[in-house]
Amino acid sequence: MSQTEIDKYNPLSRIGGYVMGDQWSLVKDDVVELTKGTIGCVPVVGAFLSSCFAIVWNKFNTSENLTKVDFEKRMKILISDMEKKMNRKIDDEIVKFCSDNFESLCSAGFGFSEIEYIYDKQKKDSKPVSDAVKKYMTINHVCVLSFY
């Protein structure tokens, strides 16, 4: 039996050849498929990781032979691009989160200032403060405290 490049580094790839003959030995594409299948078995994120592996493998596995230096350069570019995209996405989510909370806080503060005005006016006029005003002030106070 002839030995391929894969066989030099992974003797287990010849299992099919030893059992069934040379036409059943694993080639490079078979090993890739086995790797994708194995990665796909990871619970919850396996399918996603398998897809990512396939994409990266296809990007870097061209008909030309890559040197280690070229592969590392391409990986650095890919990693830096992914970091930039992830940082941009995180920044967008932080801005959205902060603006949503700011709007809610402004709304709660505005409502509280209105009810406080009504409360102060009733106190000035020596009227008893209504239960609705007291209840609304309590609810607003709790809402504002939940932002801290």
Image (tube, grey):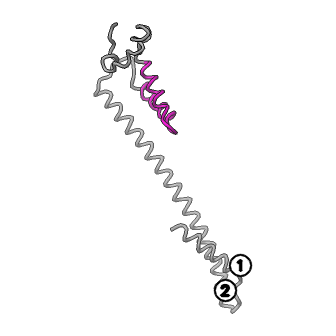
* Measured Cα–Cα span from mark 1 to mark 2: 15 Å
Q: Which residues are magenta?
A: 29-58
Q: Quadrant of residue 131?
A: bottom right
- Describe residue 142's horizontal placement relative to residue 43 as left or right: right
Q: Main secondary structure of the magenta part?
A: helix
User: Does dot 1 land on a helix, a strand or a loop?
Assistant: helix
Circle 2 residues within 10 Å: few <14, some 14–19, many ≥20? few
User: Does dot 2 land on a helix, a strand or a loop?
Assistant: helix
- Describe residue 66's horizontal placement relative to residue 103 as left or right: left
Circle 1 residues within 10 Å: few <14, some 14–19, many ≥20? few
The circle drawn on residue 124 is none
- Amino acid of disc 2: Lys
List the single residue furthest toward the front. 19
Query: Residue 4, percent across and down?
Result: 33, 13
The circle drawn on residue 121 is 2
Of 94 and 148, the residue lying toward us: 148
Which residue shows up at 46% across the image and 31% down it? 39
The answer to which of marks 1 and 2 sits earlier in the sequence is: 2
- State the residue position of label 1: 132
Query: Residue 119, percent across and down?
Result: 65, 83
Q: Is residue 18 above or below residue 50?
A: above
- Describe residue 17's horizontal placement relative to residue 135 as left or right: left
Residue 97 covered by magenta stretch: no
Quadrant holding the N terminus: top left
Q: Is residue 123 above or below residue 34?
A: below
Query: Residue 64, percent across and down?
Result: 35, 18
